[in-house]
Amino acid sequence: MATEKSVKKGYIDKAIPSNINLVTAIKALCKEKNAVIMAHYYQPNEIQDIADFIGDSLALAQQATKTNASIIVLCGVHFMGETAKILCPQKKVLVPDLNAGCSLADSCPVEKFESFIKNYPDYTVISYVNTTAAVKALTDICVTSTNAKKIVDQLPKDAKLLFGPDKNLGDYINSTTGRNMVLWNGACHVHEQFSLEKILFLKEQYPTALLLAHPECKKPLLLVADFIGSTQALLNFATESEEQQFIIATESGIIHEMRKRNPQKEFIPAPPIDSTCGCNECNFMRLNTLEKIYNCLTYELPEISIDEEIKKKAAKSIVKMLSLS
Ligand code: CIZ
């Protein structure tokens, strides 16, 4: 029997019988327990392949509200598990490894964010979904990279806006909406790590390849990109485009779904400054494994729990996002 105390390492570290087929066993556990596996596009390939649903955080949040399952195994990072729990407080939300954090969420500690927004009392606080529930509780409207422009465009033209935590995404939204949002100085370590020099070299090697970049990347990279968008937008663009080669400047996990949908096209991961493999992976996203999913379903741990007051306040900013997106 495993209890909350068994989650000492952030995940259930119990031996798994060596003769079991993990994929079959995970599917059987899901059926037995009325559980669904929801995975982000940045998850390792084998996790995307067993998921009942894959998507970006907007789609995962929307799907969480629609499922009839009693248990959601959220294969992504911690804030995504929190979002599912906030939207579905009556469901059990499990994350296979609680250590799966987010450098961007970490770049916005709640106490510092609270002092920062106090300097702007009459501003509407907009937060990217990559934040802790506590930061969302201080937020008026939550956004994702898929819906940020659409939501900001709906706000009154003279509204004073503050955006956190990603300064690159905030700067990009300012440029596409003509707003002048005050920006928190945070960033994602994966998207900040792309090497412009190596990417320009790749463009010379693949002269017809289009560079598709996520708006969390730094501005000089965005200036040379052929298309800028969220993971979902990049996936849609690559699928609908007549072109055959694409350099992808976001977490390389998305390339799995791009290749599945477009087996005849070539996808080249954009290289980071330091890398041995030539692609850019989020270490946090890679902490989830099939073994941890199996144990998490078996013991129904680790479970996401959020302080009631924070949950209520955070829910308002997410519900507002869903109503505007
Ligand atoms: O919102 C998400 O899911 C993230 C982290 C990126 C994206 O663009 O989808």
Image: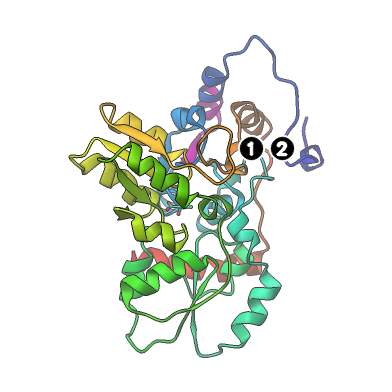
Between 202 and 166, the one lying in front of the other is 202
Residue 156 appearing in the image: yes
Whether tag 1 and tag 2 are in contact, CB under 8 A, the answer is: yes
Image depth: mark 1 or mark 2 in front: 1
Going by the image, does 174 lie left or right of 262? right
**Which residue is label 1 attached to?**
287
- Give x and y (percent) for residue 301: 68, 39
Residue 84 is one of the magenta-drawn residues:
no
Going by the image, does 234 lie left or right of 283? left
Relative height, residue 136 to residue 67 (above, below): below
Disc 2 marks a residue whose amino acid type is: Tyr
- Give x and y (percent) for residue 266: 31, 31
Name the residue rendered at 32%, 78% in the picture: 178
Q: Regarding mark 1 in the picture, which secondary structure is present there?
A: helix
Q: How crowded is mark 2: few (under 14 residues within 10 Å), some or many (20 or more)?
A: many
Residue 34 is one of the magenta-drawn residues:
yes
Q: Give the range drawn in magenta.
A: 28-40
- Give x and y (percent) for residue 133: 60, 63
Going by the image, does 268 lie left or right of 25? left
**Which residue is label 2 attached to?**
11
Name the residue rendered at 59%, 37% in the picture: 286
